[in-house]
Amino acid sequence: MVEDYAKLKADAQQAHRNGQLDVAMAGYARYLAQVPGDGGVWSNLGVLHRKAGRHLMALRAHQRALALDPGGTSTMNNAANVMSDIGQYAESLALRRQILAQTPDDLGQLQMVVRCLRGQGDYAGAISFATDALARFPDDAELRMQLAFAQLGHGDYAQGLENYKARWRAGELKPRDLPFPEWQGQSLSGKVIAVLPEQGFGDAVLFARFLSVLQGHDCRVVMAVKSPLRRLFANLPGVDAVIDGLRADTKVDYWVNMMDLAALYFRQSAAVPAPTVLSVPDDARARAQGLVAPFMDKLKVGVVWTGSVTYRGNGFRSFSHRDFLPLTDIPGVQVFSLYKGPELKAYYADGSDGFILDTGSTERDFADTAAMMQACDLVITSDTATAHIAGSLGVPVWCILHWDAFWVYTHHGASTPWYPQMRLFRQHRPLDWSGVMADVTDALQTLSEAKA
């Protein structure tokens, strides 16, 4: 019986549109086994692999699609998307510029050209391109966001944070819905203002230093934080009360986003202020000292290999716990896991807990994490909240960065003005952790020998 390939293709495409991704993938594979010259279906298959996080498989499919349909706008766009994901920015830019030659007003391509330029570390080029594009499309929130990130990476914090206010229009953050007015610079004398962190725990720690903006306003400052940060933030300078959240009956006159305090600060000064002072309770210190007590003759190293698995970019900035195992072979070193979360399942499954001792899973909150950091001689972490906590505590910390690092760390150099004692280690090339982990291992070996 001859199979109806047109129906097979149509059914797979319909399953794709319906979100039945496994069904669609099986249908595409079955179809391509008989009709391998269909570039559009290869492109669709690549889209599915990208959605599933299999970026190299996606690239493989898109390369076949491009070979069959090199001038197709959709084919080029889909391929450029996965190339951007995995750091092949030059290749992605070439395709996007081809598309723009055909459709110069394609906003998605304009946005992604800026994204690719700053991904290459070409902040000046990204700023120039974004500025020109915004002259044509001044109301586009995503273009303004991409300009903001380029400016922040370039060190133009005042303009970058001003443009970053477009984040509330860009679709990734839900606008505030509060029964109190947002502070717009009105007099705060005798008033109560609530400072609201946004996004991740690391962002809250990073931007807490800007609470100083409210000093001298003769107001009461309350800060609403999630419970894992509450003890760590218990005595923040300039904060009168730390609360779990705002309710309709909370006595507040105004609210302000924490990141907008940073924008106000940089209107007056270009200097990056010192990190805020965090609180580490005595019971947290006692817990940490008990955990490290058997290893006082060792170089004690706390490690974290991944951030929140729900963060969209976590798969690129994080690595495996197994990448830390070579550190445990260095004489005189004891490694402790400061991580708590779902990735511990794999860590326990392969027996890594025998070499990297688990202290993170029994922590109550970030105050316990901070105490463990202070009890260690060094913290080595991926780019996640622990990097900001260690940086704020002033403890020795090495931060391991993927190829397209957060703007605080920029794309070059071994240090950042935001955390002066922090040492940065960078991926040599996208998706490859082996080179940078070898750098970390060599550096720790040298440190261990120096302390022996």
Image: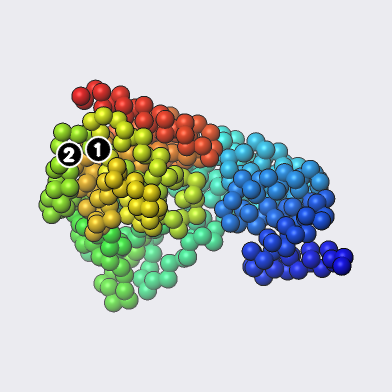
Residue at screen point 68% across, 52% down: 46
Pick the quarter of the image with the C terminus: top left
Residue 344 place in picture, x, y as percent: 36, 54
**SS category of the residue bearing label 2:** helix
Is 171 above or below relative to 447?
Answer: below
Look at mark 2 in the image and give the residue it sits on.
295
Pick the quarter of the image with the N terminus: bottom right
Q: Is residue 35 left or right of residue 380?
A: right
Sort mark 1 into few (<14), some (14-19) or many (20+) by Cα contacts within 10 Å.
many
Residue at screen point 40% across, 42% down: 322
Residue 334 has which mark? 1
Which amino acid is tagged 2? Phe
Q: Is residue 422 visible?
A: no
Q: Is residue 68 left or right of residue 340?
A: right
Residue 188 place in picture, x, y as percent: 28, 61
Q: Nearer the viewer, residue 206 or 334?
A: 334
Residues at marks 2 and 1 touching, judged by CB atoms closer than 8 Å = yes
Quarter of the figure with residue 391: top left
